Every structure is written in structure tokens, then in C-alpha cells.
Image (cartoon, rainbow, N blue to C red):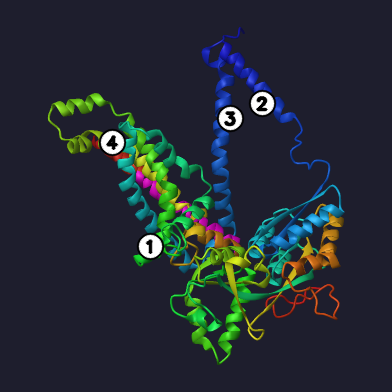
């Protein structure tokens, strides 16, 4: 009898507990801004986020960093976010086509590729040509991750040049031993010394990474200028705040922060940026959007 | 009409609660799997699967998990036997140590393996001296799977060995059985169900291994891209294709589990 009474009490408490309105979801007296950003933006955006929070008391900026393709796929599936900063136009287009992005879409930073090798250079790679040597452990990002798209363009340009040729490109591709989920994983494998070489963005060689790697420049003729687009989402619950964040990224302070972390400015010197057409060498797949 | 209290009626709140909670547990597992199936059928996902990569990944997954299982059985059975039946200083420490990979986040496991078996790792120089490279090869996949799945088998086998009635063994001893004979004819048959259960659980864990694999072995189609890695990769290209690949994995695992459990039951009948 006692056991039954206890069970009844338990049931009652359980029911009452479910009726208490939940407080957990609400931020403690303030607004939260969720920003999906490409992995290569990790350091720069964390600094920008802190500065934005200082300028907007009560606001908390939460970042989700990852391969732009992963983030775009999450957005397509309905993941909640207020701002999306991608490393290429293609993934922004993926999110746009799923109806998650509100115009305008603006270019906020540019980047270029660089080849990195471990500090002690175990495979003795000095030039781009050495990447084709048999047995080199080359690590790239997975297909669809923007830095991989840019790398493929670089290899195509090299293949088109008679000095290197198709055989070169094929040999380099044959040396790929792993396709990482994002550019920071590529950098980590090289920094740890497990890979002989990797292709990352110039901005990924941060002060933290620099002591562990050597850089091999990719000549302009074969390099790609990556264009990073940023936009607020279609269904953001705080469009004013989201737009303020995008404006901050495009402002002098935001651009200075990006430059400090190795990014190229959003627009060429002399030209004024604005709503971009997302066309250009870094965006083979996007037609003019606005 | 007078209400007649019965034992059943008096205990209905208790039963209802038990059924409710159990039902929630079943729902928690069945709902996501059902949603996967429904979305896959709705999107006609089978038309979009990159055939070759699925075959490669499936072959790699099953080959590596079978090898991992073999290693786990070979190394785990003696370990479980010792832990269950012998008493020695440090026994408890070893028992806890073996269980650690279960609570370790897979990414941490991957990092630890990298630091041990990588080129710059603890054993890196030794392995290089023998001409062996582990990272970025299927060997790394097998190592990662074995590391995370071994504790599951040892745990189950240990329990199976512990509950064997010593009197039966002593009777065999009196009849002149050798230690090996005792193991084969008394201990193993009595522990068989627990061993099989542990083997299945550890195989399933090895099959689903992702975090340690991607950090330690990397991901390359045909060489190190197991089915979980393929699903993660295809997810970015096409969610429907990812769903279909996931369903294939669930289906294959389901078939193997059913087959193994049926076999186990047949054995009981023979006994």
C-alpha cells in the first residue's frame, strides 16, 4: 500500500513539474546573436565578436565555426542562425537557394592560398613542383569545403601551364592522403608533423601556427583570390542586431581586425565595396545575385 | 454496483508509469530511425547515391571492423578471464583503465592515438624504423576501432566469466580435466552468451566509430573513409544521399545483428 502511495506522489510531482514554465531557453536578460562562420575566420571573428559585445552591452555573440559547406548544409536543414559568413560564394548560394538568406549579400574579406609544410620539413618540399614527388603525404580539405574548391582551381591553372602540365596535377592529386572536414584540420595535421604538406589560406598561418610551419608561396598566376560573402538570415529574430553585426564587420574597425589576422581587405584599394555580385575568380558557380 | 478492489486495479498507477517510461525509451530510438526511413523514401534518395563510394566505404567498414573484432576477441578474452578470476595487486586499476575509452570523447581518443602512433608520436621513430606508417592508412582505422570497442567486449566477457559456478569446474577437475579442457568444455560454453553479446556490442561500436577515425586515420575514399565518414562527407553535398547511405548502414547492421542473435539461439537449442 505504501509503495502505491509513493508512486502516486511521484506521478503527481512529475505532472506538476512539467507545468512549470521553462526558463532555460531565455538568455539571462539580454540578446543572443548566432553567427555561422567559416573555420578560417575563427580567430578574427572571435576578436570582432568581443569588440561588438563591448559596443553593445547586453548582447552575446555566439559563433559556430566549421567548414562553410557543413554550415550551409545545416542552414538548409533549418539550423537557427542570425548571420552567415561563408568562405566562398558557392556555399552562400546553397543557403540562398534554400531560402535561408536575406539580401543584400556583401563581400567582407578576401584571402589567398598558401602551401604549408611542417617546420622541420620532413619531405624537403621547397617548391610547388616538389608536391608532385612520389610519396609526399599531402592533406587537403574535403570536396565542397571552399578551400578545396580554390585548391582545385589552383591545380587546374597549374595543369594548364605547359611548365607543369596535366601529369603534374595528376601526381599531386595522387599524393592526397586525407580529405579533412575544414581548413583548420588541414593546418593542424601539418602543424603536428603528420602530413608533409597542406594547402590552406594565408590567414590560417596565425601567430599560433607560424612557429610550427613553413610557408611556400603560390605565385599570383596560379593563386585564387577567395571572396568571403556575409549576409543575415531570412528568418533572424533580430534583424536590426544582425545587420549591425554585418555593418561592424564591414566597418573600419572590423576590416582592421580582419587585416590583423591576415585577411586581404574586402575591396581593392580605390574601389568602394557594396552589395556584391558574387561573381569573380573565387565564385565559379554563382551568377550575379543582386 | 459495488466496486471490488483487485490487486491489479490497485497497482495500475505503477504499471502505467512503467509502461509510459518504457514507451518513451522506445519512441526515442524508433522516431529518429523512422524519420530517416520516411525522408529517404520521400526524397527517392536511392537515385542520388554515388554508387562507387558507397561500395568502397561499405567494403572498408566491414573489412576493418571484422579485423578489429578478431583482435578484440584475441586480446580481450584472456584479459577478461584474468580480471574475472584472478586476484592480484592493481587488478582494480587495470579494470578501470580498460573501461576508460568508453567515457573518453572519440576526438580525444583520436588525438591520443595520433600522439602515440603518429610520425612524431611516442612510437613514431620506432615504427618508422620498421618501415611502418600507421596514420592515413587502414591500419589506423583498425587501431581506432579496436581502441574504442575493446572495453565493451571486456566488460561483458568479464561478467560472463565471473558468474560461472566454481563447483562445476571443481567437479571437472576431480574427473581429471586439464585446464584447457576445462576452458573449452565448461567455462566457454557457460560464458558463451555473454561473450557473444559483448562481441556484438563491440562490433557495433567499431562500425559506428567516427571521431577517433577522422582525427587519427584521416578520410580518403577507398583507403580510410568508412561508412560513418562517408555519411558525414555526403551530407554536405546532398542530404538525401546522406540519408540513403545512413539507411544502408542501419539496414546492414540490423541484418547482421538478427543473424547473429538467431545463431546464438540455435546454439542454445543444441545444448
The quadrant holding residue B11 is: top right
Secondary structure character of the magenta stretch overall: helix
Select label 4 or label 1 by which is in front: 1
Select label 1 or label 3 by which is in front: 1
How crowded is the residue under tag 4: few (<14 C-alpha within 10 Å), some, or many (20+)?
Answer: few
Q: Which residue is mark 3?
A: B20
Residue at the left extreme of this rendering: B176
Q: Which residue is mark 1?
A: B127
Residue at x 31%, y 42% (from the top left corner): B77
Extent of the magenta region: B238-260
The quadrant holding residue A28 is: top right
Rounded to the nearest whole Å, what is the CA distance between mark 2 and mark 3? 12 Å
Q: Residue under mark 4: which chain is it in?
A: B
Residue at x 60%, y 85% (from the top left corner): A157
Task: Please report whichever mark, 1 or 3, sits nearer to the chain's N-terminal start.
Answer: 3
Q: Can residue B136 be seen in this snapshot? A: yes
> Where's residue B182, x and y in %?
20, 34
> Where's residue A258, x and y in %?
76, 67
Residue A117 on the magenta segment: no
How crowded is the residue under tag 2: few (<14 C-alpha within 10 Å), some, or many (20+)?
Answer: few
Q: Secondary structure at mark 1?
A: helix
Q: Relative to B64, is A143 on the left or the right? A: right
Q: Quadrant of the N terminus of chain B?
A: top right
Q: Which residue is mark 2?
A: A14
Q: Which residue is mark 4?
A: B268
Select label 1 or label 2 by which is in front: 1
Q: Confirm or deny contact between disc 4 and disc 1 (CB under 8 A).
A: no
Vertical arrangement, residue A178 with respect to residue B13, above or below? below
Task: Please report whichever mark, 4 or 3, sits nearer to the chain's N-terminal start.
Answer: 3
Amino acid at each position: 500500500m505504501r509503495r502505491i502511495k509513493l508512486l502516486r506522489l511521484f506521478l503527481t510531482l512529475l505532472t506538476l513539474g512539467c507545468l512549470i514554465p521553462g526558463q532555460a531557453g531565455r538568455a539571462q536578460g539580454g540578446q543572443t546573436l548566432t553567427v555561422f562562420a567559416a573555420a578560417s575566420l575563427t580567430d578574427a571573428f572571435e576578436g570582432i565578436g568581443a569588440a561588438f559585445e563591448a559596443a553593445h552591452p547586453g548582447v552575446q555573440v555566439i559563433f559556430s565555426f566549421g567548414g562553410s559547406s557543413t554550415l550551409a548544409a545545416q542552414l538548409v536543414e533549418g539550423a537557427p542562425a542570425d548571420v552567415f559568413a561563408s568562405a566562398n560564394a558557392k556555399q552562400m548560394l546553397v543557403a540562398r537557394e534554400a531560402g535561408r538568406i536575406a539580401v543584400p549579400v556583401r563581400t567582407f574579406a578576401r584571402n589567398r592560398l598558401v602551401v604549408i609544410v611542417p617546420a622541420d620539413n620532413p619531405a624537403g618540399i621547397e617548391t610547388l613542383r616538389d608536391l608532385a614527388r612520389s610519396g609526399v603525404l599531402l592533406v587537403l580539405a574535403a570536396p565542397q569545403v571552399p578551400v578545396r574548391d580554390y585548391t582545385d582551381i589552383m591545380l587546374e591553372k597549374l595543369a594548364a601551364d605547359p611548365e607543369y602540365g596535366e601529369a603534374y596535377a595528376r601526381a599531386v592529386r595522387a599524393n592526397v592522403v586525407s580529405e579533412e572536414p575544414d581548413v583548420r584540420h588541414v593546418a593542424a595535421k601539418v602543424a603536428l608533423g603528420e602530413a608533409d604538406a597542406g594547402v590552406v589560406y594565408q590567414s590560417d598561418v596565425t601567430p599560433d601556427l607560424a612557429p610550427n610551419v613553413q610557408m611556400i608561396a603560390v605565385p599570383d598566376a596560379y593563386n585564387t583570390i577567395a571572396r568571403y560573402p556575409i549576409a543575415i538570415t531570412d528568418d533572424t529574430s533580430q534583424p536590426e542586431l544582425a545587420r549591425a553585426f554585418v555593418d561592424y564587420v564591414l566597418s573600419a574597425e572590423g576590416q582592421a581586425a580582419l587585416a590583423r589576422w591576415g585577411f586581404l581587405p574586402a575591396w581593392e584599394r580605390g574601389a568602394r565595396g557594396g552589395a556584391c555580385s558574387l561573381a569573380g575568380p573565387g565564385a565559379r558557380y554563382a551568377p550575379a545575385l543582386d | 454496483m459495488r466496486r471490488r478492489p483487485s490487486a491489479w486495479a490497485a497497482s495500475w498507477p505503477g504499471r502505467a508509469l512503467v509502461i509510459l517510461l518504457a514507451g518513451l525509451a522506445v519512441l526515442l530510438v524508433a522516431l529518429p530511425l523512422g524519420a530517416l526511413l520516411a525522408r529517404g523514401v520521400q526524397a527517392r534518395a536511392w537515385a542520388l547515391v554515388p554508387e562507387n563510394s558507397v561500395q568502397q566505404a561499405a567494403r572498408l567498414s566491414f573489412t576493418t571492423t571484422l579485423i578489429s573484432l578478431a583482435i578484440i576477441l584475441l586480446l580481450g578474452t584472456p584479459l577478461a578471464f584474468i580480471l574475472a578470476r584472478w586476484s592480484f595487486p592493481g587488478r582494480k586499476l587495470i579494470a578501470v583503465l580498460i573501461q576508460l575509452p568508453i567515457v573518453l570523447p572519440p576526438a580525444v581518443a583520436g588525438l591520443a592515438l595520433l600522439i602515440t602512433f603518429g610520425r612524431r608520436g611516442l612510437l613514431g621513430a620506432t615504427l618508422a624504423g620498421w618501415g611502418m606508417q600507421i596514420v592515413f592508412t587502414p591500419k589506423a582505422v583498425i587501431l581506432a576501432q579496436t581502441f574504442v570497442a575493446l572495453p565493451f567486449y571486456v566488460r561483458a566477457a568479464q561478467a560472463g566469466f565471473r558468474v560461472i559456478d566454481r563447483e562445476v569446474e571443481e567437479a571437472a577437475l576431480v574427473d581429471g580435466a586439464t585446464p584447457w579442457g576445462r576452458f573449452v568444455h565448461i567455462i566457454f560454453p557457460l560464458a558463451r552468451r555473454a561473450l557473444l553479446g559483448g562481441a556484438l556490442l563491440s562490433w557495433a561500436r567499431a562500425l559506428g566509430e567516427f571521431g577517433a577515425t577522422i582525427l587519427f586515420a584521416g578520410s580518403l575514399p577507398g583507403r580510410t573513409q568508412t561508412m560513418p565518414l562517408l555519411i558525414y562527407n555526403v551530407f554536405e553535398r546532398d542530404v538525401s544521399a546522406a540519408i540513403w547511405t545512413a539507411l544502408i548502414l542501419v539496414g546492414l547492421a540490423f541484418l547482421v545483428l538478427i543473424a547473429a542473435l538467431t545463431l546464438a539461439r540455435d546454439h542454445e537449442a543444441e545444448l
